[in-house]
C-alpha cells in the first residue's frame, strides 16, 4: 500500500506546485506548463488509487480510461492555450504597430 | 484586471524575494497540501472501485482489454464527448490564426528527409498495430492517434513543401471522420438495440475497431493540425479582398 | 525472502523515481529560462511514462510517451519560438511601451 | 423499435446528439451553416419539449448509455430542474442563433472587415453548437466523470468563442478565461478522484446512497465546489468574468453570460442539495450566502461605475450570480421548499434578461460603433425596439413585478423572513436598489433625445437583432405571471415539492 | 369568466391597447393618435361607470390569478376602488385633451402618449388591486411608466428630477416590497378584506406588525409625498404641465394616498390599528406635512413649485382624515378629499400650464394683471385656489368641513388647530396670486406671448380647466345630492361599517 500512498502524495505535491506557479508567475508559457504539471498530478493520484501489486487482485481499469482521455484532452487544450498565448502576444504587437502608424499619420476622423 | 496587473508587477521582482502575497499563498498551498495529504493518508487501504464490476461484464464487451472495454463500450459516451473536445480544440485553433508556414520554400535537408522517409511509414505501421492490438492489449485509438500525430509533427517540423498545399476541405473531412463514424455507429446501435452506443454483442468488437480506426486517424490529424497552429491556407472565404484578412497579424 | 528483496528494490525504485520527478517538476517550474523549462518538461513526461508503467497502466504509459514526448514538447518549443520572434519584433518597435495597459483600454470596433 | 416510443428514455440523447451532429456539419461544410444551426436549435427545443412531456406523464427517467447499468455505465437523467435548465438553454439558444445571424450579416455588410467577419462567423457556428452540446450534456448527465468531460467541452468552446473577436483585449481575456476554466476543471477532477477513492462509483445516485461524513468525501466536495465556483465566478473568483464577457462578440457575450455560467452553477447546486446534502453544514451554507451577498453588492457597485455598456452588463452578471448563492443559507430551515424554485427562477429570469441585455448592448455597439454610456443619448429614436427590450430586461434584473426576477426575489425574501434571517432580505433589497441605479443610469441616456440630436439614417439594423432581444426580455418579464408552470414542472417527481404543493398548482 | 371579470379586463385594456398601438404609430399620425386616445379614455369612463353601477348594486367584481403559492394577482372592484378609478379616468380624459393641445407640434409625441396611456392603465390597476401584491405590482409599474414622462424634455434639469424621482420611488418600492413580504410571512395573506387580518395576530406579533405598518406607510408615503419623503415632488414640476397634472392629481401622489387608505382600511383594518395604537403617528406625520408644505409653498415664487408644495400639504389631509379612523366624519372628509384635491389641483396645474404655454409666465411675480389677458383661465384658477383655501361652496370646503367635524367629535383640538392654521396659510399663498392676477397692473410685456386659437388660448387648453373648475363648484354645491363624490364616500364608509 505504500506505493499507492507514495505516488498519491507525489501527485498531490505536483498539483500544489503547479497551482502555486500558476498563480504567481505571469509568463503565459509557464502558466501552461504549470497547468500541465497540475493535471499530471491529478492523474497520478487517480491511477495510484487503482494500483494493486502484482498478484493481489485486479487493476481497476476505469481510472486508466479516465486518465487516458484526460491526457489526450490536456494535450489538445495545451495546444489551444499555447496558440492563444501566441496570438495575445502577436495581436498586441500588431496593435502597437498599427497605433504607431496611426500616430504617424495626421489625425483622421474615427469613422 | 487590476489583480492581474498587480500579479504581473509582483512577479517581475520575483527572484529577489517572495513578497507578502506570495508568502501567504505559499502558506495556503502548503496547508492545503498537508490537509489533503493527511486525508489521503487516512483513506482505507483497499479503496473501493469498479474492477470487479468491469471484469464481470468484460466478456459482453466484445474486446479483451479492460481499458478499451471501459473506454469504448462501458463509458463510450464519455469518449465520444472527449473526441469532440479534441475536435473543438482544432476548431478553436483554426478560429484563432492561420497555420504557420515559412514564406519561401526552403531547400529540404537531405538528412531530415531521410529520417522522415524512414520514420513516417514506420510510425504509420506502429499506429495501425496499436489500434489493432487495442482490443486485447495496451493500445487503441488514442495511442495510435498520438503516434500518427507525432508522425504529422515530424513532417511539419521538416517543413515539407507538400504540406503547404493541403487543401482545407479534405483536411476537415479527415478531422471530422472519427467523430462522424463514432456518432454514426452510436446512432446505428440506437436503431438496432434501442440504446445509444449499445453495441450488439456479437458485432461489438468490429464496431469498436471501426470507431478506433476512424478516431485514430482523426486524432492524428487533430494533433498535427494543432501543431500546425491554425487553419490551412485556403480556408479564407472566397470572393473577398485578401489584403486585410483575418490573419493579418501573421507577419508584421 | 525473495519477495521482501523484490519489494524493497521496488520501493527504492519508487522513491528514486518520485524524488526525481518532484525535483524535475520543481526545477522546471522555477527555472528562469523557459526553454530549459520546456526541455525539462519533456523529460518529466518520459519519467511519468515510467511511473505509469510502474503503476501497471501500460495504456496510459503508451499515450504519455507518445503525447508527452512526441507532441507536447514540440508544441511548447514551437510556441516558444513563435513568441520569441514576435517579442523581438516588438522590442525593435518600442522597448518602453507598457503593454499591460493597452489591452484594457482597447475596444472592439464595429 | 423501442427507441421511438414516446416513453422511451432514449429521447434524452436528442438535445445532446443533435447539436453535436450540427456542430460537426457546421465545421465540415462551407455553405448553409446557418440553416444547419437553426435546424439544430429548433430541433433541440422540440426535443426538450418532448422531454418535458415525458416528465409530466411518465415522471423522472434514467437513460443508461449503451444499455450498461449504473456501476460501470453512464446514466443520463431527466428531472424538473434539469429540464427547466434545458428549456432555458434551448429558448435562449434559439434566440442567440437568430441574433448571431443578424449580427454577423450586419457586420459583413461593412466592406472594410468583411473577410474577418466572415471568418468569425465561419467558426462561430460549430463552436456554438458544440457548446450547446456540452451544456445539454451537463444538465442531463448523472455521472461525475462525464460531467467533467462536459465541463471541458464547455470550457474549450467558451474560451474559443471568447477569443473570436480577435481583438487583443478579448484574446487576453480569453486566455485568462481558458486558464481559469482549466484550473477549475482540474480542481473538480481532483475532487472526483477523492470521491472515487472514497466511494468507488461515479454515478450520482449511487454516490447519494453512499454519502457519509468521511474526510475524503468532504475534501471531494470542497475541491469540486471550488472548481465549480471558479467557473461560476462567485465573488472573489469573479475577476476573469467581466473582461471575458465584455470584450467578446455580442452573441458570444450572450452565450457566456446567460448559459455558460449557469451550467457550472447548476452542477454546484445539484451537488450541494441533492448528492452531498447529508454532509453540508450550516456554516458552509452561511459562508456561501455571505460570498453571494458580497457579490451582489460588489458587482452592482462595479456595474454602476463602468463607463461602457458591455462592461456594465458583465458586472451586473457578477452581481446577479450572488442572488443564486444567497439562496444557500435559506434552505436549511425552510426544508428545501423554495430552494429549487428560487434558484431555477433566478437562473431562468437572469438567463433571459441578461441575454436580452447583451443583445441590446451588441446592437447599440454595432449601431453607434461604441458603447460608452455617456454618449448613448437618443438611441431610442433609431432603435426603439432595442431600447424597449433593454427596459423590460432591466425590470427583470431589478426584480420588479411581474418579472421572473421578482418571483425569485419574492421567494428569497419570504424564505429569509420565514427563517428569521432578515439580514439576507436586507442584502436582497439593497441589491435590487443598486441594480435599479445601474440599469437606469443607462436608461436615462437611452430615453433622452437632446435638442441638437441629429437624426441620422444609419444602416437599418436587421430585425433578427432586435426581435430576439425583445422576445427574451418579454419572456423574462412574463415568466413571473406564468410562474406556476415552471414550479409545476419542478414538482414532478420531486418528493419534497410534491408534498408541499399537493396538486395545488394548475 | 363572467361579465364582471370581462369588465375588469376591458377596463384595463381600454387604455393599455391604445398605448401599445400608439407606441408603434409613426410620429406624424397625430390625428389617429388623438382619436385612439380619446376613444380609449371615453370607453374607459363608460366601462368604469358601468362598474360603479354594478358595485353600487352589490355586484362582486373579482379576478384571481394565482402565481405561486402565497402569491396571487387579485383584481377586485369595491366602492373605494371605484372612487379612485372614476376620478382617474375622468381626469385622464381631460388631461389627454389638454395634453394634445399642449404638445401640439412638439417632438416625440407618440412616445409621450404611449407612456401616458400606460400610466393610466397602471393607475387604474392600482385602484382595482385586490391585495398588496397586486398593488405593489402596479405601484412599481407606475414608477416605471411615469419616469419617461418626467424626463420627457430631456434637459439636464428634467433628468436630475427624473433621477431623484426614481431614487425616491424605487427606494420606497423596495421598502414596500420588504414590508409586504414580511406581512405575508406573519399574517399569511395580504388581501384587502375590508376588516383587516384577524386580530389574534395582534396578540402575538404586535411589535412586528407595528413595524411593518410603519414600513408600509413609508413605502406608499414616498409617492404620497409625506414629509420627509417629499423631496422628489417639487423637482418633478419641470415636466410638461400635463405630466404635472398627472403626477399631482391623477396618478402618482394619489396612488400613494390611496395606498395609505388601503393599508389602513383594508390591510390592517380599523380595529387592529386602534389596538396597535400606531395611528397617532400617522396623524402626526400628516400634520407636520400639512404645515411644512404650506410654509414652504409660501416661500416659492415659481408658480408650479408653489403648487407642488401645496400638493404636499393638501394630500396629507387624506392621511390626516384616515388616521382619525374612529371618527366616521373625519374619514369621510379624508376620503372625499382624494377626489376633491384631485379636481382642484388639476385645475390649478392646467391653468399654470396655460399661462406658461401662452404667455411664458412661470413666476408669480410675472403674473400682474394676467387676468385681463386670460380671464377664463384665471377664473378657473381662482375657483381652484379658493377651493384649496376651503371657501364655500367649493369642494374644498366640504372636505375641510367634514374633517373639522370629525376632529371636533373626537375632541382632537389640535387637529382643528392644524386645519385652521393650514387654511390660513393656504389663503396666504393663494390669495396674493389672485390679487396680483385680477387687480395687479401689467408690467411690461409678457415673457413669451403667443396668440393661439380664437380664444385667449387654444380651445383644447382652455376647455379642461374650465370643466374641472365647474366640477369643483358643482360638486361642492350638490355635495348632498344622490350622485356626488360625497354621496359615494358615504356609501364607502357605510360599506366599511364605520
Image (spheres, rainbow, N blue to C red):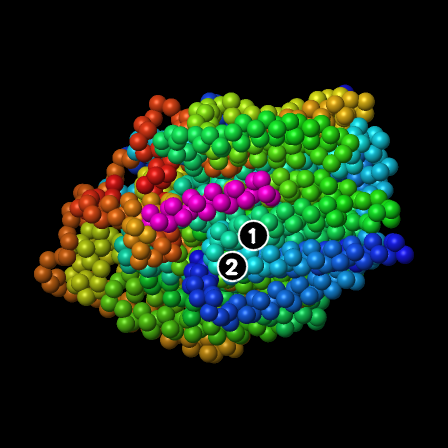
- Please identify the quarter of the rendering in which residue B65 is found: top right
Q: Quadrant of the C terminus of chain D?
A: top right
In the depicted view, which residue is nearer to us: E274 or B100?
A: B100
Q: Residues within 10 Å of mark 2 (few under 14, many from 20)?
A: few
Question: What secondary structure is marked by label 1?
Answer: helix
x, y (%) of residue E486?
Answer: 47, 57
**Which residue matches tag 2?**
C31
- Please identify the quarter of the rendering in which residue E379 is found: bottom left
Residue positioned 80% across, 32% down in the render: B64
Q: Residues within 10 Å of mark 1 (few under 14, many from 20)?
A: some
Asked if E396 appears above or below B173 in the picture, the reply is: below
Task: Say whether marks 2 and 1 touch (CB < 8 Å).
Answer: yes
Question: What secondary structure is marked by label 2?
Answer: loop
Q: Which residues are magenta?
A: C68-90
| Chain holding disc 2 | C
x, y (%) of residue B77?
Answer: 69, 34
**Which residue matches tag 1?**
C40
Q: Report the residue that reaches farthest toward the front.
A: B111
Q: Is residue A33 left or right of residue E445?
A: right
Q: Report the residue that reaches farthest toward the left.
A: E444
Amino acid at each position: 500500500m505504500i506505493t499507492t500512498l507514495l505516488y498519491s502524495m507525489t501527485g498531490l505535491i505536483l498539483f500544489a506546485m503547479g497551482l502555486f506557479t500558476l498563480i504567481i508567475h505571469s509568463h503565459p508559457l509557464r502558466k501552461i506548463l504549470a497547468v500541465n504539471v497540475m493535471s499530471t498530478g491529478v492523474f497520478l493520484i487517480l491511477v495510484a488509487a487503482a494500483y494493486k501489486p502484482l498478484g493481489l487482485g485486479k487493476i481497476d481499469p476505469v481510472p486508466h480510461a479516465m486518465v487516458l482521455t484526460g491526457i489526450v484532452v490536456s494535450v489538445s487544450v495545451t495546444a489551444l492555450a499555447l496558440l492563444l498565448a501566441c496570438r495575445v502576444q502577436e495581436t498586441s504587437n500588431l496593435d502597437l504597430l498599427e497605433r504607431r502608424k496611426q500616430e504617424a499619420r495626421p489625425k483622421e476622423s474615427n469613422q | 484586471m487590476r489583480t492581474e496587473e498587480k500579479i504581473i508587477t509582483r512577479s517581475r521582482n520575483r527572484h529577489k524575494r517572495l513578497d507578502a502575497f506570495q508568502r501567504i499563498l505559499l502558506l495556503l498551498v502548503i496547508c492545503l497540501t498537508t490537509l489533503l495529504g493527511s486525508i489521503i493518508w487516512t483513506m482505507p487501504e483497499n479503496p473501493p472501485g469498479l474492477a470487479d464490476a468491469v471484469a464481470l461484464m468484460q466478456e459482453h464487451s466484445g474486446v479483451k482489454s479492460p481499458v478499451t472495454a471501459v473506454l469504448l463500450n462501458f463509458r463510450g459516451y464519455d469518449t465520444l464527448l472527449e473526441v469532440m473536445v479534441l475536435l473543438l480544440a482544432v476548431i478553436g485553433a483554426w478560429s484563432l490564426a492561420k497555420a504557420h508556414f515559412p514564406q519561401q520554400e526552403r531547400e529540404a535537408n537531405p538528412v531530415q528527409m531521410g529520417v522522415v522517409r524512414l520514420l513516417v511509414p514506420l510510425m504509420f505501421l506502429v499506429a495501425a498495430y496499436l489500434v489493432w492490438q487495442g482490443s486485447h492489449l495496451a493500445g487503441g485509438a488514442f495511442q495510435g492517434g498520438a503516434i500518427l500525430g507525432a508522425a504529422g509533427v515530424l513532417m511539419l517540423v521538416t517543413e515539407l513543401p507538400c504540406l503547404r498545399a493541403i487543401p482545407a476541405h479534405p483536411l476537415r473531412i479527415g478531422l471530422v471522420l472519427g467523430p462522424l463514424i463514432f456518432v454514426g455507429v452510436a446512432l446505428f446501435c440506437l436503431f438496432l438495440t434501442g440504446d445509444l452506443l449499445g453495441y450488439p454483442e456479437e458485432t461489438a468488437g468490429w464496431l469498436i475497431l471501426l470507431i478506433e480506426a476512424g478516431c485514430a486517424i482523426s486524432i492524428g490529424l487533430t494533433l498535427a493540425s494543432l501543431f500546425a497552429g491554425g487553419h490551412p491556407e485556403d480556408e479564407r472565404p472566397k470572393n473577398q479582398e485578401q489584403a486585410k484578412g483575418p490573419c493579418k497579424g501573421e507577419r508584421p | 525472502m525473495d519477495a521482501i528483496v523484490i519489494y524493497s528494490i521496488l520501493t527504492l525504485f519508487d522513491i528514486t523515481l518520485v524524488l526525481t520527478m518532484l525535483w524535475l517538476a520543481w526545477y522546471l517550474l522555477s527555472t528562469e529560462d523557459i526553454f530549459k523549462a520546456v526541455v525539462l518538461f519533456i523529460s518529466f513526461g518520459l519519467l511519468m511514462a515510467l511511473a505509469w508503467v510502474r503503476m501497471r497502466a501500460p495504456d496510459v504509459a503508451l499515450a504519455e510517451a507518445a503525447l508527452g514526448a512526441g507532441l507536447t514538447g514540440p508544441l511548447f518549443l514551437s510556441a516558444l519560438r513563435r513568441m520569441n520572434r514576435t517579442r523581438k519584433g516588438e522590442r525593435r518597435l518600442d522597448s518602453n511601451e507598457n503593454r499591460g495597459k493597452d489591452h484594457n483600454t482597447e475596444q472592439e470596433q464595429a | 423499435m423501442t427507441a421511438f416510443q414516446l416513453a422511451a428514455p432514449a429521447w434524452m440523447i436528442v438535445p445532446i446528439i443533435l447539436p453535436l451532429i450540427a456542430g460537426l456539419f457546421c465545421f465540415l461544410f462551407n455553405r448553409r451553416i446557418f440553416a444547419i444551426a437553426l435546424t439544430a436549435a429548433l430541433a433541440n427545443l422540440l426535443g426538450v419539449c418532448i422531454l418535458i412531456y415525458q416528465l409530466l406523464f411518465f415522471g423522472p427517467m434514467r437513460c443508461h448509455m449503451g444499455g450498461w447499468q449504473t456501476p460501470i455505465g453512464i446514466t443520463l437523467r431527466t428531472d424538473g430542474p434539469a429540464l427547466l435548465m434545458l428549456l432555458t438553454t434551448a429558448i435562449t439558444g434559439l434566440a442567440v442563433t437568430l441574433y448571431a445571424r443578424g449580427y454577423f450579416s450586419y457586420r459583413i455588410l461593412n466592406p472594410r472587415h468583411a473577410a474577418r467577419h466572415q471568418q468569425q462567423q465561419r467558426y462561430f457556428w460549430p463552436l456554438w453548437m458544440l457548446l450547446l452540446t456540452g451544456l445539454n450534456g451537463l444538465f442531463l448527465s448523472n455521472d461525475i466523470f462525464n460531467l467533467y468531460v462536459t465541463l471541458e467541452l464547455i470550457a474549450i468552446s467558451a474560451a474559443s468563442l471568447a477569443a473570436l473577436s480577435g481583438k487583443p483585449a478579448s484574446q487576453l481575456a480569453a486566455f485568462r478565461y481558458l486558464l481559469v476554466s482549466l484550473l477549475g476543471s482540474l480542481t473538480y477532477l481532483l475532487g472526483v478522484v477523492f470521491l472515487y477513492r472514497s466511494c468507488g462509483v461515479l454515478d450520482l445516485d449511487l454516490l447519494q446512497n453512499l454519502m457519509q461524513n468521511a474526510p475524503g468525501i468532504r475534501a471531494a466536495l470542497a475541491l469540486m465546489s471550488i472548481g465549480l465556483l471558479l467557473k461560476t465566478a462567485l465573488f472573489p473568483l469573479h475577476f476573469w468574468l467581466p473582461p471575458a464577457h465584455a470584450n467578446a462578440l455580442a452573441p458570444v457575450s450572450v452565450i457566456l453570460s446567460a448559459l455558460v455560467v449557469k451550467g457550472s452553477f447548476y452542477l454546484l447546486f445539484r451537488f450541494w442539495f441533492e448528492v452531498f446534502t447529508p454532509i453540508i453544514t450550516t456554516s458552509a451554507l452561511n459562508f456561501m450566502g455571505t460570498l453571494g451577498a458580497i457579490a451582489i453588492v460588489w458587482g452592482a457597485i462595479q456595474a454602476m461605475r463602468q463607463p461602457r455598456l458591455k462592461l456594465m452588463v458583465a458586472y451586473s452578471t457578477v452581481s446577479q450570480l450572488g442572488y443564486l448563492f444567497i439562496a444557500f443559507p435559506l434552505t436549511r430551515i425552510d426544508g428545501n421548499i423554495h430552494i429549487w424554485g428560487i434558484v431555477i427562477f433566478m437562473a431562468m429570469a437572469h438567463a433571459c434578461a441578461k441575454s436580452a441585455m447583451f443583445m441590446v448592448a451588441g446592437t447599440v455597439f454595432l449601431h453607434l460603433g461604441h458603447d460608452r454610456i455617456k454618449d448613448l443619448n437618443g438611441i431610442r429614436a433609431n432603435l426603439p425596439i432595442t431600447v424597449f427590450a433593454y427596459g423590460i430586461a432591466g425590470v427583470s434584473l431589478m426584480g420588479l413585478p411581474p418579472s421572473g426576477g421578482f418571483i425569485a426575489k419574492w421567494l428569497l425574501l419570504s424564505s429569509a423572513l420565514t427563517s428569521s434571517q432578515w439580514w439576507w432580505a436586507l442584502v436582497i433589497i439593497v441589491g435590487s436598489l443598486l441594480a435599479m441605479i445601474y440599469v437606469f443610469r443607462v436608461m436615462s441616456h437611452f430615453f433622452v433625445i437632446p435638442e441638437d440630436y441629429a437624426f441620422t439614417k444609419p444602416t437599418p439594423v436587421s430585425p433578427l437583432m432586435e426581435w430576439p432581444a425583445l422576445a427574451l426580455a418579454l419572456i423574462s418579464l412574463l415568466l413571473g405571471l406564468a410562474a406556476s408552470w415552471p414550479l409545476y414542472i419542478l414538482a414532478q417527481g420531486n418528493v419534497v415539492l410534491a408534498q408541499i404543493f399537493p396538486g395545488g398548482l394548475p | 369568466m363572467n361579465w364582471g371579470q370581462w369588465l375588469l379586463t376591458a377596463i384595463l385594456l381600454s387604455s393599455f391597447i391604445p398605448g401599445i398601438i400608439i407606441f408603434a404609430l409613426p410620429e406624424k399620425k397625430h390625428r389617429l393618435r388623438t382619436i385612439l386616445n380619446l376613444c380609449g379614455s371615453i370607453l374607459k369612463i363608460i366601462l368604469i361607470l358601468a362598474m360603479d353601477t354594478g358595485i353600487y348594486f352589490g355586484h362582486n367584481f373579482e379576478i384571481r390569478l394565482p402565481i405561486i403559492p402565497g402569491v396571487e394577482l387579485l383584481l377586485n372592484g369595491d366602492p373605494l376602488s371605484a372612487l379612485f378609478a372614476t376620478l382617474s379616468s375622468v381626469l385622464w380624459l381631460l388631461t389627454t385633451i389638454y395634453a394634445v393641445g399642449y404638445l401640439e407640434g412638439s417632438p416625440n409625441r407618440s412616445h409621450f402618449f404611449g407612456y401616458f396611456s400606460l400610466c393610466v392603465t397602471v393607475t387604474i390597476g392600482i385602484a382595482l388591486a385586490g391585495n398588496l401584491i397586486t398593488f405593489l405590482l402596479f405601484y412599481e409599474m407606475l414608477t416605471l411608466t411615469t419616469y419617461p414622462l418626467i424626463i420627457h424634455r430631456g434637459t439636464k434639469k428634467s433628468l436630475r428630477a427624473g433621477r431623484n424621482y426614481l431614487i425616491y420611488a424605487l427606494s420606497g418600492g423596495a421598502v414596500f416590497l420588504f414590508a409586504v413580504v414580511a406581512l405575508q410571512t406573519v399574517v399569511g395573506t395580504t388581501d384587502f378584506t375590508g376588516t383587516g387580518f384577524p386580530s389574534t395576530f395582534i396578540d402575538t406579533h404586535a411589535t412586528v406588525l407595528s413595524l411593518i405598518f410603519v414600513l408600509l406607510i413609508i413605502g406608499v408615503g414616498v409617492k404620497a409625498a409625506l414629509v420627509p419623503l417629499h423631496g422628489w415632488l417639487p423637482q418633478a414640476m419641470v415636466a410638461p404641465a400635463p405630466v404635472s397634472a398627472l403626477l399631482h392629481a391623477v396618478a402618482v401622489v394619489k396612488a400613494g394616498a390611496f395606498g395609505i387608505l388601503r393599508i389602513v382600511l383594508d390591510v390592517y383594518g380599523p380595529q387592529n390599528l386602534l389596538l396597535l395604537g400606531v395611528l397617532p403617528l400617522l396623524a402626526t406625520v400628516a400634520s407636520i406635512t400639512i404645515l411644512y408644505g404650506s410654509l414652504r409653498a409660501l416661500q416659492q415664487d415659481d408658480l408650479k413649485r408653489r403648487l407642488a408644495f401645496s400638493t404636499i400639504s393638501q394630500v396629507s389631509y387624506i392621511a390626516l382624515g384616515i388616521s382619525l379612523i374612529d371618527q366616521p366624519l373625519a374619514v369621510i372628509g379624508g376620503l372625499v378629499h382624494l377626489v376633491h384635491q384631485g379636481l382642484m389641483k388639476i385645475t390649478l396645474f392646467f391653468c399654470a400650464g396655460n399661462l406658461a404655454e401662452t404667455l411664458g409666465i412661470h413666476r408669480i411675480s410675472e403674473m400682474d394683471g394676467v387676468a385681463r389677458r386670460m380671464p377664463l383661465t384665471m377664473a378657473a384658477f381662482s375657483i381652484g385656489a379658493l377651493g384649496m383655501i376651503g371657501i364655500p361652496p367649493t369642494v374644498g370646503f366640504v372636505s375641510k368641513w367634514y374633517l373639522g367635524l370629525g376632529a371636533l367629535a373626537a375632541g382632537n383640538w389640535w387637529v382643528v388647530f392644524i386645519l385652521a392654521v393650514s387654511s390660513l396659510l393656504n389663503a396666504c399663498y393663494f390669495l396674493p396670486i389672485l390679487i396680483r392676477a385680477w387687480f395687479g397692473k401689467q408690467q411690461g410685456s409678457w415673457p413669451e406671448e403667443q396668440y393661439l386659437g380664437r380664444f385667449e388660448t387654444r380651445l383644447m387648453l382652455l376647455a379642461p380647466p374650465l370643466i374641472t373648475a365647474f366640477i369643483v363648484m358643482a360638486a361642492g354645491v350638490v355635495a348632498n345630492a344622490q350622485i356626488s363624490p360625497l354621496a359615494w364616500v358615504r356609501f364607502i364608509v357605510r360599506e366599511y361599517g364605520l
